[in-house]
């Protein structure tokens, strides 16, 4: 089955290159380091630990582990990503402290070249990036491979089950899986992971410390907007979702005079189009790269890595990818800052987390524009309720930490066994 998979990959390469070029129209970063996509590039030195985090979200999940590895001087760290946005986030967080590369496409030749140039003593993959040729190549070279912070939604699991003959043999070669929840662990076992190699360690994102500078920057931004004004944020929004948010804003402003909206599209390259949409709706707009004019009706975030600052400047957060059927985005970021959060009904990517935060009262689910507008108005008018929701979220994060240490223990056992 892996042979057919590889043949199919080679056959798709013309389309892969075309897709890369298409994406480069919006983000020129896709045209940089092209050789690395095929396993070329400078040597990274042998004996390091390779950590793969596909994009920004996975980089954020890797942050607690990477900080610990760097603190304990565990040797060179090679951090690979797939997207330019992920690579830029790595650069902003770890400039000069780690080696950066793109993980090559899962072609046998590209993977062989990559491993020959990097020669890692272990490979750590964040969440669920199942690449059969990479897994087999690591196994053939006796390189331990572990999945950490692993999660698998029911929809994704159903997709993998359809190709179980491809993925089950690969998963059987994985040395260890550190899953976020029992449900994730069960789904991974169901598609081929060895039960005795799967442990539940929790979500490492719960161990990300909020820097004091983030809160300070958020408060500074809030003062620029106006400390007495109510501010809500719609974060990580997608096409089709901004329209619903702006419809809700019209209703909110009828009830909460002078309130401001911070609107942050999930993909920063869409910020210009989102700003144009805002203007067409008759609102004044200011972009972050232009300095954020606090008097504007809508502030559009068009920078990377500043979402926590925008949350810290807000009274209330709506987390996107959830009114449209994307599957939702990270609800932990507002919870860590003590910001009450709203989400739409489509939260399959973070189903367990969304349910847990809803159960403790830190998150409310809204169904459509009218419900969003009504709930935003209610909460912006009720500071006590916002405070209680925020404290419940913060308490949940504090009481569920420790995944970093549990995950690191799994990695250490593998390193010791392979030494």
Image (cartoon, rainbow, N blue to C red):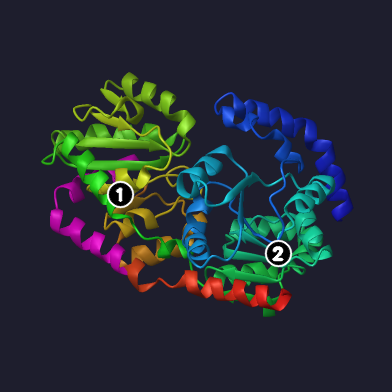
- Circle 1 — which element? helix
Image location (x, y in percent) of residue 60: 47, 53
Give the x, y percent position of residue 175.
71, 71
Residue holding disc 2: 121
To which residue does mark 1 refer?
Answer: 214
On-image quarter of the N terminus: bottom right
Magenta-highlighted residues: 368-395
* Of the pair 242 and 296, the residue shown nearer to us: 296
Name the image quarter holding the C terminus.
bottom right
Q: Which corner quadrant of the image does residue 412 belong to?
A: bottom right
Above or below for 294 versus 59:
above
Q: Is residue 371 magenta?
A: yes
* Inter-mark Cα distance, 1 to 2: 35 Å
Which residue ends up furthest to the bottom in the rendered image? 196
Q: Is residue 361 visible?
A: no
Q: Residue at x 48, y 30 (%)?
A: 269
Q: Is residue 21 visible?
A: yes
The crowding category of the residue bearing disc 2, from other C-alpha atoms within 10 Å (few below 14, some 14 to 19, many at least 20), is some
- N-term mark: 1 or 2: 2
């Amino acid at each position: 089955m892996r042979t057919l998979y590889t043949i199919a990959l080679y056959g798709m390469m013309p389309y892969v290159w075309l897709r890369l070029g298409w994406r480069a129209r919006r983000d020129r970063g896709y045209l940089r380091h092209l050789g690395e996509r095929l396993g070329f590039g400078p040597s990274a030195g042998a004996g390091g630990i390779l950590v793969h985090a596909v994009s920004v979200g996975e980089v954020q999940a890797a942050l607690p582990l990477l900080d610990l590895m760097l603190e304990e001087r565990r040797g060179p760290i090679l951090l690979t990503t797939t997207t330019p946005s992920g690579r830029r986030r790595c650069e902003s967080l770890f400039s000069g402290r780690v080696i950066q590369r793109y993980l090559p496409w899962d072609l046998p030749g590209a993977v062989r070249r990559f491993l020959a140039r990097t020669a890692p003593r272990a490979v750590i993959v964040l969440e669920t990036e199942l690449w059969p040729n990479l897994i087999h190549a690591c196994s053939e070279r006796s390189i331990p491979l572990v999945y950490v912070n692993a999660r698998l939604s029911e929809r994704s699991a159903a997709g993998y089950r359809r190709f179980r003959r491809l993925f089950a043999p690969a998963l059987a070669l994985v040395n260890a899986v550190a899953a976020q929840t029992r449900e994730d662990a069960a789904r991974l076992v169901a598609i081929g992971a060895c039960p005795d190699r799967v442990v539940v360690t929790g979500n490492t994102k719960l161990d990300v410390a909020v820097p004091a500078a983030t809160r300070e920057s958020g408060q500074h931004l809030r003062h620029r907007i106006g400390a007495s004004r109510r501010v809500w944020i719609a974060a990580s929004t997608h096409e089709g979702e901004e329209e619903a948010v702006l419809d809700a804003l019209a209703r909110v402003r009828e009830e909460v005079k002078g309130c401001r909206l911070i609107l942050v599209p999930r993909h920063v390259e869409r910020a210009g189009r989102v700003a144009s949409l805002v203007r067409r709706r008759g609102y004044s707009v200011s972009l972050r790269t232009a300095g954020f004019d606090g008097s504007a009706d809508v502030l559009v975030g068009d920078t990377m890595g500043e979402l926590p600052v925008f949350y810290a400047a807000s009274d209330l957060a709506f987390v996107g990818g959830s009114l449209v059927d994307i599957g939702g985005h990270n609800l932990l970021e507002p919870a860590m800052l003590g910001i009450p959060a709203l989400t739409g009904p489509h939260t399959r990517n973070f189903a367990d987390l969304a349910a847990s935060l809803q159960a403790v009262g830190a998150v409310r689910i809204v169904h459509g524009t009218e419900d969003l507008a009504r709930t935003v108005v209610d909460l912006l008018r009720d500071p006590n309720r916002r405070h209680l929701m925020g404290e419940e979220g913060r308490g949940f994060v504090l009481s569920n930490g420790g995944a970093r240490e549990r995950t690191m223990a799994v990695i250490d056992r593998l390193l010791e066994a392979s030494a």
